[in-house]
Image (tube, grey):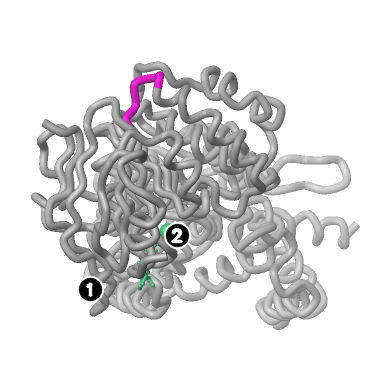
Amino acid sequence: MSLLTTTGLTAHYGDFQALFGVDIALNEGETIAIIGANGAGKTTLMRSISGVLQNGPEMITLSGQPIGGLSADQILPLGLAMVPEGRRLFPSLSVEENLLIGTYGRKVDGYWSLEAIYDLFPILAERRNNPGTALSGGQQQMVAIGRALMSNPKVLLCDEISLGLAPVVIKDIYAAVPKIQASGASLIVVEQDIGQAMKVADRVYCMMEGRVTLEGTPDSFSRNDIHAAYFGVSA
Amino acid sequence: MIWLDTLVQGILLGGLYALFAAGLSLVFGIMRLVNLAHGDLIVMAAYLILLLVTLLGLSPFVAAAIAAPLMYLIGWGLQKHLLNRTLGTDILPPLLVTFGLSIALQNALLEGFSADSQRLPTGEISTASVDLGVMTVGVLPLLTFGSAVAVIVGLNQLFYRTELGRAFRATSDDPTTASLMGIRPSDIFAKATAIAMLVVTLAALYLGMRSNFDPNIGPARLIYAFQAVIIGGLGSLWGTLAGGIIIGLAQTIGAAINPEWQILAGHVAFLIVLLLRPRGLFPRAFD
Ligand SMILES: Nc1ncnc2c1ncn2[C@@H]1O[C@H](COP(=O)(O)OP(=O)(O)O)[C@@H](O)[C@H]1O
Ligand SMILES: [Mg+2]
């Protein structure tokens, strides 16, 4: 049984339908990448899974339990955390407070703690008392990842953690991914930057216009397959 | 010496206004909700204290201590079941609903307690004063001011030193992302309004001991509170204290020049500050 599934997942913004029956599965210990062009529906999929958007209860399951109808604050304690697109740090909280709020109201056992996050991203320890938003983009992304890890999630969703960052910074951020995998978390990594995602993923889903257009292991398809699934036309 | 006395009286009066305003400031800072019934809730709490005083023969202070948890629960329920439903991208529903609540509260109090003006019995404390050498100062105004400072310090500690305070700030910044942290914004808002009602009870205690009150004085208290919050800068608690003091000072100085100018002077000070600092004295860095 998969740790997380979506089955025939649909999502709407008012009259606009953004997802048309998306089926994905994440197995225990696995990392999957979800790639696709801007507007393909990747963020909508992440917002649905994390509970920011509500869906039919049975459309999403976590450890076999239907969670599609639950709100984000109900889903987090079940072991699913998200690094949202655009980082979304809390401007009135310091770096350390941004990390601490990841465990609001709960004691969580597990690998991740303030110390473990500072170990993963040492620069954050130096900046712990700065306002979160006074940091560089890459450092802010580290805070956003650390904040989500603080709840020791079974499933971690990362929505475009490379967005707007320089290549060297992206490398730094992605260097943390194997350590997160080693801590036992299962990951969904959403990227437009296909290269990084393919390197860390066991399987890849490609989305276009609210549908999954390609699915498989990174080495099972050619550049041309990806191009077709990504843009709807062959290269 | 008369001027020194006026200044001190003004500052101390500012403490009362800051108490009126602190709950409003707290709620606005966290959920951008302008509660137009805030003044009427203060009056309601004053009647609740009066009821406990008359029925049980308690001192106003003890009665307020009993009224506080009741007001806390009322605030929690009010936010959870009514005000939370009005929050959204549109700013009009909360204004309309709290305006309606204000009228409903005034009428309910009128029904229950009549239009007669009331006062909490204070015993010696209302006339007691301390001699500071150059002047004497009333114990009650001093106590009011001390309570206002204690409330502001306490709320700041809550905001910046506790986990709940962290959640208050995070939810105020971005409720959607806060919910991704396992925070339920509607619960946070309910707790904030509940805490504001504790401050409202304290404000009611001093209001009722220092002056007469009747069911219709709420809106006027709301205006002083509102002015204090705006002068201080929306969301800043120390700013709210400063705002209260400025209104208090302006009123006492105005009254010292001409007794008819008391209220007007407060409003003029408010307008002057708004002209010079449209975002208040201590605005938030971001918004
Ligand atoms: N809040 C919103 N309201 C209306 N439409 C939206 C909203 N957010 C996204 N969309 C639309 O939904 C589609 C999918 O968007 P999104 O999930 O953000 O894609 P991606 O993350 O793959 O770039 C796009 O057509 C986008 O314009
Ligand atoms: Mg996106």
B94 in magenta: no
On whether ligand 1 comes within 8 Å of the CB at mark 1, the answer is no
User: Residue placed farthest to the right in the image?
Assistant: B1
Instruction: Name the side, left or right, on which B122 lies relative to B72.
Output: right
Quickly name the residue at label 2: B31
Decide if residue B121 is on the left or right side of residue B105: right
Question: Disc 1 marks which amino acid?
Answer: Glu
Q: Residue at x 35, y 70 (%)?
A: A233
Discs 2, 1: same chain: yes
> From the viewer's perspective, is residue B140 above or below residue A209?
above
Q: Relative to residue B127, is residue B7 drawn left or right?
A: right
Q: Mark 1 — residue?
A: B111
Q: Secondary structure at mark 1?
A: helix
Location of the C terminus of chain B (image quadrant): bottom right
Whole-percent x, y for residue A59 in the image = 12, 52
Secondary element type, mark 2 = helix
Upstream in sequence: badge 2 or badge 1 = 2
Pick the front one: A38 or B108 = A38
In the picture shown, does residue A110 fall above or below B218?
A: above
Work out whether B266 lies above or below B142.
below
Q: Does the image show residue A171? A: yes
Q: Residue shown at 16%/33% (left/top)?
A: A2
Task: Give the magenta range.
Answer: A182-186
Q: Quadrant of residue B103?
A: bottom left
Position of B47 relative to B164 (above/below): below
Identify residue type, mark 2: Met
Q: In front here: B268 or A194?
A: A194
* Cβ–Cβ under 8 Å for marks 2 and 1: no
Q: Residue at x 63, y 42 (%)?
A: A138
Please rate how many residues cluster around mark 1, counting C-alpha atoms within 10 Å: few if below 14, some from 14 to 19, many from 20. Answer: few
